Image (cartoon, helix red, strand yellow):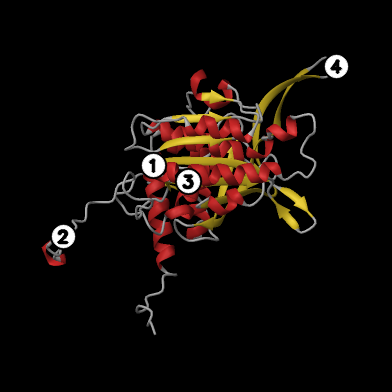
Amino acid sequence: MKKKKNVQEEAPITEDPLTPERSLYTPLDNNRIVISSGSTLLDLAISGSRVHGGGIPGGIMVEIFGPPSSGKSCLLMDICASAQAKGGEVRIADPEARLDKEYAALFGLQIPRELYKRPNTVSELYGYLDSWAPKDKNVINVFGADSIAALSTDLELGESGDKRGQRKAKELSELCRKISRKIAHEHLLVVFTNQERQSDYGKTTPGGFAVPYHASLRIRIYRAGVREVEVIKKKKVEVVNPKTGELTTRDMEFSKVIGIESEAAIVKSSISEEHQTAPLYIISRRGIDDVRANLVWLKKSLGLSKFLCADKEFTYINQAIRYIEDNNLEAQLREMVITTWEDIDSLFRMERKNKVRF
């Protein structure tokens, strides 16, 4: 006769620290690894209420979408560069075939040929992602695709074509189901950019609802009205009078648009709070200008008449930027922004007792 198993004699289950290999979700705290989006204010909007300085954690899918020329690819490149700077690996899928090494180099991003692909179909994108096995899983490794709107399907490329236009949405849904556990277990950060289209029912993104459903973080980027970043320079120019031949010197003023001002809105977040926004100043040949955004935000938030640069104040933004960069005060400026943001955010936290369950 078999002896009945005594439940009390079983060894107690020990609670080991959660790791990406053991759990599909690791609580976000101050010890959790995050990477920067390239924008201090966007980092705070993403998870500033849960971790000091905010940032993007690993083990999730992110969708960045918006109208054309708003900064989607720029933000993706900045995220990839931040991952590389912290020792992570980066893989880039470029269905739009628009990325070049010179553009990536502006962000300090190095993309070897073997880590860059131009998939034509959803199935090719899945194969490229599924076969990736980063060496170090203790850091955040980024897989970026720019953009999934440019992907096609084998059926669409075939002779008969995709007459119903539904195959791509089905394949993207299948892709998301297959890679969701891989993303979490291997601590990957998968970032898809997507286009924004106008439909009969308002603005939407192509490719069905699979990516919006599976994404833990969705960021919409759009131009902030018609605001552009313009620089005005003065220069002495020698001018010859055509009648007298006399040479005179005049002070001439020149202006040039060097970038755009966009707005990043958190429209979905399983990480922290939704409905947060952050300004993005995207400068030609530089990318996201974090110093400019921090200086402008501090001035507006504190109600100052000048730009605060640690121990000095400046009337003009370009003078303030030059002072910060020449004296290597970027980290100090960033910490000032984080501290101010956290002080403001604490004003809106509600202290209430736990919900009563019935």
- Tag on residue 12? 2
Q: Amino acid at mark 3?
A: Ser
Whole-number angstrom distance, CA of label 3 to CA of label 2: 31 Å
Between label 1 and label 2, give the one nearer the viewer. 2
Element on which disc 4 rests = loop
Q: Who comes first in sequence, dot 4 or dot 2?
A: 2
**Residue highlighted by disc 1:** 187
- Of 25 and 33, nearer the camera is 25
For the residues bearing labels 4 and 2, Cβ distance under 8 angstroms: no
Q: Amino acid at mark 2?
A: Pro
Please tell me which residue is depicted at 18% across the width and 56% down the height of the picture: 14
- Of 25 and 268, nearer the camera is 25
The image shows residue 172 at horizontal and vertical percentages of: 61, 43
**Residue highlighted by disc 3:** 180
Q: Amino acid at mark 1?
A: His
Left or right side of 27 for 315? right
Please tell me which residue is depicted at 43% across the width and 54% down the height of the picture: 47
